[in-house]
Image (tube, rainbow, N blue to C red):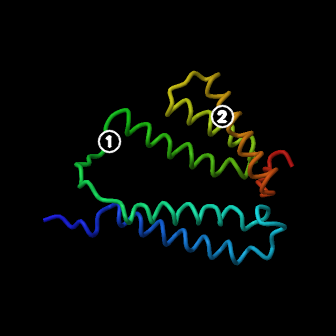
């Protein structure tokens, strides 16, 4: 007997909708401190909340196709997963020391190399592009302060 009422999609949809609602409440709380509708501390939680609520509602009302068998990854896949987690943990430490730009560039380069199996020069190009896009989005457009790093200042 399978419980279709509590499928992984339904549980994930409910969790996404709840987290999205909390994010929207936080955006509404921060709205008076913002400069405009799309500029200020409320913008990112608001956009994230709307997207999470939409995705959660879609998952809640989507028909389930059933459950597949899942197994723990082995070999190279397991190693890549563990190395990805280690890279992200090192990134969390380095962002306070090196600042946003250098630590994000290094983390993205390692992740592109590890997960995408790109050559080092291609990984560096992709990571520089992605770092610049995120810098433009968050720092220039959304006026979000990022860590500058304590090593150089």
- Where 122 sits versus 127, above or below? above
**Comparing labels 1 and 2, the label whose residue is closer to the camera:** 2
Location of residue 90 in the rendering, given as x and y in whole percent from the top left corner: 60, 46
The single residue placed furthest to the left in the displayed view is: 1
Q: Is residue 108 left or right of residue 77?
A: right
Residue at the (24%, 65%) spot, across then down: 4
Task: Please rate how many residues cluster around mark 2, counting C-alpha atoms within 10 Å: few if below 14, some from 14 to 19, many from 20.
Answer: many
Residue 138 % position (x, y): 75, 52
Q: Along the line of sight, which residue is nearer the eye, 8 or 47? A: 47
Q: Which residue is mark 2?
A: 127
Image position of 54 with respect to 127: above or below: below
Q: Between 127 and 148, which is closer to the camera in this rendering?
A: 127
Q: Which image quadrant for residue 27?
A: bottom right
Asked if 128 appears above or below 122 in the picture, the reply is below
In primary-sequence order, the first of circles 1 and 2 is: 1
Query: Residue at (62%, 76%) from the top-left corner?
Result: 25
SS category of the residue bearing label 1: loop
Q: Identify the residue at horizontal 65%, vertical 22% (top origin).
A: 121
- Provide the residue designation for mark 1: 73
Q: Looking at the image, do the residues carrying marks 1 and 2 touch, with CB atoms under 8 Å apart? A: no
**How many labels sit on residues?**
2
The image position of residue 67, as x and y in percent, is 24, 54
> 10 Å neighbourhood of mark 1: few (<14), some, or many (≥20)?
few
């Amino acid at each position: 007997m399978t419980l279709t009422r509590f499928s992984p999609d339904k549980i994930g949809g409910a969790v996404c909708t709840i987290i999205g609602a909390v994010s929207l409440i936080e955006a509404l709380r921060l709205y008076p401190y913002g400069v405009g509708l799309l500029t200020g501390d409320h913008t990112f939680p608001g956009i994230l909340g709307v997207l999470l609520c939409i995705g959660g509602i879609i998952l809640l009302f989507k028909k389930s196709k059933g459950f597949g068998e899942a197994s723990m990854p082995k070999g190279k896949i397991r190693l890549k997963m563990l190395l990805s987690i280690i890279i992200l943990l090192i990134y969390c430490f380095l962002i306070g020391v090196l600042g946003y730009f250098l630590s994000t560039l290094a983390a993205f380069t390692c992740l592109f190399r590890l997960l995408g199996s790109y050559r080092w020069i291609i990984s560096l190009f992709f990571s520089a592009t992605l770092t610049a896009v995120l810098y433009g989005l968050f720092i220039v457009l959304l006026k979000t302060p990022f860590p500058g790093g304590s090593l150089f200042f």
